[in-house]
Image (cartoon, rainbow, N blue to C red):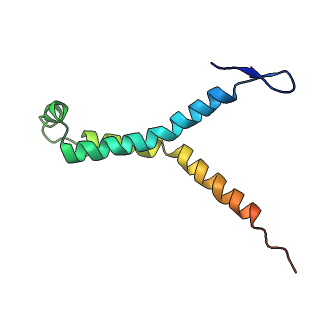
Amino acid sequence: MIAARDETGRRSHAAALGAAGWLALAAAPTFAVMALLTGVLGGGHMAMMCSTAQDASPLSGMVPMYVLMSAFHSAPWLKLISARRSGARRRISIPST
């Protein structure tokens, strides 16, 4: 982990937190692309193994799994969008007359 001292002399882990933030933002689009590629190109050998089960659930394939993983990892994107919208509202404050 990268640690540096800030102006008060305390150790700061800003670089490590920044990397973790970027990884959190990368998860949802990565799973979405994987779902798209698996749906378009097919699942290969794993899809054949999973499709052999009779009366399988519609959520048992790789594409639904990747879509669900993308949805579960969308929280950092929602926080980013919310922060930008609230920041934009604060900057454009209309004075009362």
- The number of numbered discs placed on residues in the rendered structure image is 0
**Residue 21, percent across and down?**
58, 36
Q: Quadrant of the N terminus?
A: top right
Picture quadrant where residue 20 is located: top right
The foreground one among 21 and 6 is 6
Picture quadrant where residue 70 is located: top left
Picture quadrant where residue 60 is located: top left
**Residue 53, percent across and down?**
14, 35
**Left or right: 77, with 65 as reference point:** right
Q: Quadrant of the C terminus?
A: bottom right
- Residue at image point 71% right, 64% down: 89
**Left or right: 30, with 93 as reference point:** left
**Left or right: 53, with 16 as reference point:** left
**Residue 34, percent across and down?**
32, 40
90 versus 15 height, above or below: below
The foreground one among 87 and 55 is 87
From where the camera sits, is residue 60 visible?
no
35 versus 9 height, above or below: below
- Residue at image point 69% right, 29% down: 14
**Residue 16, percent across and down?**
63, 26
Residue farthest along the bottom direction in this orientation = 97
- Residue at image point 76% right, 61% down: 90
95 versus 13 height, above or below: below
The foreground one among 2 and 78 is 2
From where the camera sits, is residue 6 visible?
yes
- Residue at image point 38% right, 40% down: 31
